[in-house]
Image (cartoon, rainbow, N blue to C red):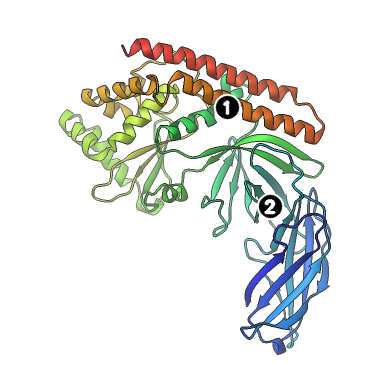
């Protein structure tokens, strides 16, 4: 029944009255009236209000309706729905209340948040006055280079380490359905206080060296709850799933497995079982060296496996060879298995991390058992840390300093905007990148000596 909806201006400011437009495909003599109902979402949800919409025929034989809502406060979401009363007396609510996002929504913003990072507003799940549902509704708004993008109806779910932000189908964030939002402060044990900084550094290193890995990005997160709007700097990590595969040019219909402490769990094609992986493991573990070598050369993506070991060794990923990785095959006759890193919160902790560590891995050991492939890996390590190489000391020190500087400038803007001083957060940033730089100096010195 709905042909189109829209708001004008599309990105309103707090001084703007907003015209809400609705186009229906029904003839005008079928409709008695249309009522616009709306509510505002800030730290709380206001009671719903309503007004009659003006109507006039459109060019396709239907009817256009319009109504103008008053200005509202900056950083507030407005949710609209339409109650259509037919001449028969029947009333219909549009969008349908059972839709995942049963509203036409817009965000009011004056541009007052000073930030060096993209901004993410998290609208925690709360009960709408417009629809009667058992489950409350959440949402998100993301501000990057242009105006805010509204993702009303996106779900916020607790995860083992942070929050999962799940977008609605057809309303994804740059094609991604699921993002992981990590805590700003890490975990209060050992080096895990640095966890988000390590995750960022590790995944960025994979990307810069041409590896297959999730994207990561620091965001200023504004978290609405019942009493305040808390600002934090939080790392967002792309989820490895079917959408990740498609966005990286891989067949989303392939088999994807996750390795957790030597146990693989299938992530896609659950109905077809794990035979693809069982066949691979049978060949690798047959006890026949020639058969195992043939499987490595014919079934592994050798470039991918080599780069995974090289980057893992450079960043000292002691947790990423028998745990915390994904394994993928597109299932074509010539399909080769690829590894994808995950959960890099325990890296950069041991400058003396041994060169032969990958030979202990669940899958990597089969690659490194082949002496010619292991020599290739060592040669790639040496090239990576050489002057001008992708992991050369000057480059990596500059990279760490740039990230630290970005976060510190954004923190200063955050403090000025909120009128607060966040001494503990500043110390965390400074200490994290000091430790990263110290580790890099010692690590590259160790590798230069070991690879002579």
Q: Is residue 208 left or right of residue 304?
A: right
Pointer 1 residue: 402
Dot 1 lies on which element? helix
Above or below, comparing residue 334 to residue 294 in the picture = below
Q: Residue at x 70, y 35 (%)?
A: 232
Residue pushed farthest top? 449
Tell me where residue 68 appears, x and y as whole percent: 80, 68
Q: Nearer the viewer, residue 287 or 34?
A: 34
Quadrant assignment, res 34:
bottom right
Mark 1 → mark 2, Cα distance in angstroms: 34 Å
Quadrant assignment, res 1:
bottom right
Residue pushed farthest bottom? 29
Pointer 2 residue: 138
Q: Is residue 294 left or right of residue 308?
A: left
Tell me where residue 327 appears, x and y as whole percent: 37, 39
Do we see residue 20 in this rendering? yes
Q: Nearer the viewer, residue 315 or 90?
A: 315
Do we see residue 363 in this rendering? no
Residue 317 image label:
none
The mark nearer the N terminus, 1 or 2, is 2
Q: Residues within 10 Å of mark 1 (few under 14, many from 20)?
A: few
Dot 2 lies on which element? strand
Tell me where residue 73 appears, x and y as whole percent: 82, 52
Q: Residue at x 67, y 82 (%)?
A: 58
């Amino acid at each position: 029944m709905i042909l189109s909806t829209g708001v004008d201006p599309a990105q309103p400011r707090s001084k703007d009255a907003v015209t809400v437009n609705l186009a229906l495909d029904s003839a005008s003599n079928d409709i008695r009236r249309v009522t616009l109902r709306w509510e505002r979402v800030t730290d709380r949800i206001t009671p719903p209000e309503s007004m009659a919409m003006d109507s006039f025929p459109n060019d396709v034989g239907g009817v256009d309706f319009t109504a103008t809502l008053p200005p509202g406060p900056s950083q507030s979401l407005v949710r609209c729905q339409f109650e259509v009363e037919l001449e028969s007396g029947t009333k219909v609510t549009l969008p349908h209340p059972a839709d995942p996002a049963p509203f036409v929504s817009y965000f009011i913003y004056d541009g007052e948040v000073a930030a060096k990072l993209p901004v993410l507003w998290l609208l925690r799940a709360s009960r709408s006055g417009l629809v009667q549902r058992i489950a409350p509704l959440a949402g998100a708004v993301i501000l990057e280079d242009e105006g805010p993008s509204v993702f009303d109806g996106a779900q916020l779910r607790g995860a083992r380490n942070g929050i999962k932000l799940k977008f609605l189908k057809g309303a994804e964030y740059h094609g991604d359905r699921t993002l992981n939002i990590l805590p700003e402060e890490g975990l209060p044990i050992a080096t895990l206080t640095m966890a988000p900084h390590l995750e960022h550094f590790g995944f960025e290193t994979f990307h810069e060296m041409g590896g297959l890995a999730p994207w990561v990005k620091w965001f200023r997160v504004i978290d609405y709850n019942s009493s305040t709007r808390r600002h934090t700097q939080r790392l967002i990590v792309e989820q490895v799933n079917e959408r990740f595969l498609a966005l990286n040019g891989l067949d989303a219909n392939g088999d994807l497995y996750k390795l957790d402490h030597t146990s693989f769990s299938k992530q896609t094609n659950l109905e077809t079982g794990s035979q693809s992986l069982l066949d691979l493991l049978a060949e690798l573990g047959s006890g026949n060296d020639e058969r195992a070598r043939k499987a490595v050369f014919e079934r592994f993506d050798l470039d991918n496996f080599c780069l995974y070991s090289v980057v893992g060794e450079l960043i000292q990923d002691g947790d990423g060879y028998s745990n915390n990785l994904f394994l993928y095959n597109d299932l074509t006759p010539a399909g080769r298995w690829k590894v994808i890193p995950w959960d890099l919160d325990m890296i950069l902790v041991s400058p003396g991390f041994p060169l032969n560590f990958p030979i202990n891995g669940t899958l990597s050991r089969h690659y490194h058992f082949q002496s010619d492939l292991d020599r290739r890996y060592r040669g790639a390590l040496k090239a990576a840390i050489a002057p001008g190489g992708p992991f050369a000391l000057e480059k990596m020190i500059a990279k760490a300093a740039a990230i630290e500087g970005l976060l510190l400038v954004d923190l200063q803007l955050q403090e000025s905007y909120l009128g607060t001083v966040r001494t503990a957060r500043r110390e965390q940033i400074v200490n994290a990148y000091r430790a990263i730089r110290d580790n890099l100096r010692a690590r590259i010195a160790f590798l230069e000596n070991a690879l002579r």
